[in-house]
Image (cartoon, rainbow, N blue to C red):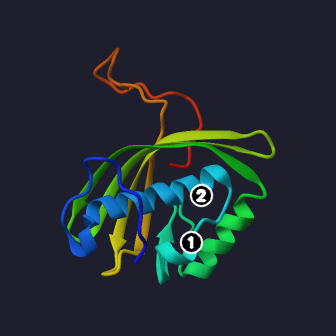
């Protein structure tokens, strides 16, 4: 099990003196920080060997070694500029993380969107499954001017 520094007020009695919620939140923060710093700060420690990680736009990685390869390879082509956590929800062995994400690829393309990660944990607090969902930031009401929907004539983002 990984030990983390817990923010003042977060320490709650639980297994090993740490609240599972605080430990799980710190694991998620560590994962997001790895992307921001482009450094593997412990992929082997936070993911189960048989993890299933599904990105919001369909790629799926079915073990820790593939997650590690994806992380290392992707960071040769781009940079995560922001991955801001807005909120956590916990229920049993699952956590939902609401976040904002922005990256820039080496070709200059910038992507940004709101997202949610649904995480399932092992008994020893490793990520067993992680499924991402994305939401376009460019929202609008198609019924604003009419009872008939008026959709924008633009390419829809992949999420």
Q: Which residue is labeled 2 in the image?
A: 34
Q: Is residue 147 above or below residue 44?
A: above
Q: Mark 2 falls on what kind of element?
A: helix
Quarter holding residue 14: bottom left
Q: Are marks 2 and 1 in contact (CB under 8 Å)?
A: yes
Find residue 100 and report its horizontal and vertical position in percent: 47, 41
| Nearest to the observer: residue 22 or residue 145 | 22
- The residue sitting at the bottom extreme is 50
Which residue is drawn at the image coordinates 57% and 70% (left, top)? Answer: 42
Which residue is drawn at the image coordinates 41% and 69% (left, top)? Answer: 3
| Nearest to the observer: residue 144 or residue 100 | 100
Find residue 78 and report its horizontal and vertical position in percent: 73, 50
- Is 21 placed left or right of 78 in the picture? left
Local packing at callout 2 (Cα closer than 10 Å; few below 14, some 14-19, many 20+) is some
- The residue sitting at the right extreme is 107
Q: Mark 1 falls on what kind of element?
A: helix
Residue 56 seen from this side: no
Residue 16 seen from this side: yes
Q: Cα distance, mark 2 to mark 1?
A: 9 Å
Q: Which residue is labeled 1 in the image?
A: 43
Quarter holding residue 93: bottom left
Q: Which mark is residue 35?
A: none
Find residue 109 and report its horizontal and vertical position in percent: 73, 40
Find residue 70 and report its horizontal and vertical position in percent: 66, 68
């Amino acid at each position: 099990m990984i030990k983390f520094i817990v923010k003042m007020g977060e320490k709650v009695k639980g297994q090993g003196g740490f609240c599972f919620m605080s430990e799980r939140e710190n694991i998620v923060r560590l994962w997001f920080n790895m992307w921001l710093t482009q450094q593997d700060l412990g992929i082997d420690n936070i993911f189960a060997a048989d993890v299933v990680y599904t990105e919001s736009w369909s790629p799926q990685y079915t073990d820790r070694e593939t997650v590690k390869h994806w992380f290392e390879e992707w960071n040769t082509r781009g940079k995560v500029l922001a991955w801001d956590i807005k909120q956590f929800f916990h229920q049993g062995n699952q956590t939902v993380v609401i976040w904002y994400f922005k990256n820039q690829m080496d070709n200059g393309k910038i992507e940004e969107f709101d997202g949610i990660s649904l995480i399932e944990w092992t008994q020893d607090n490793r990520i067993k499954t992680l499924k991402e969902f994305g939401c376009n930031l460019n929202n609008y009401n198609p019924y604003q001017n009419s009872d008939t929907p008026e959709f924008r004539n633009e390419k829809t983002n992949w999420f």
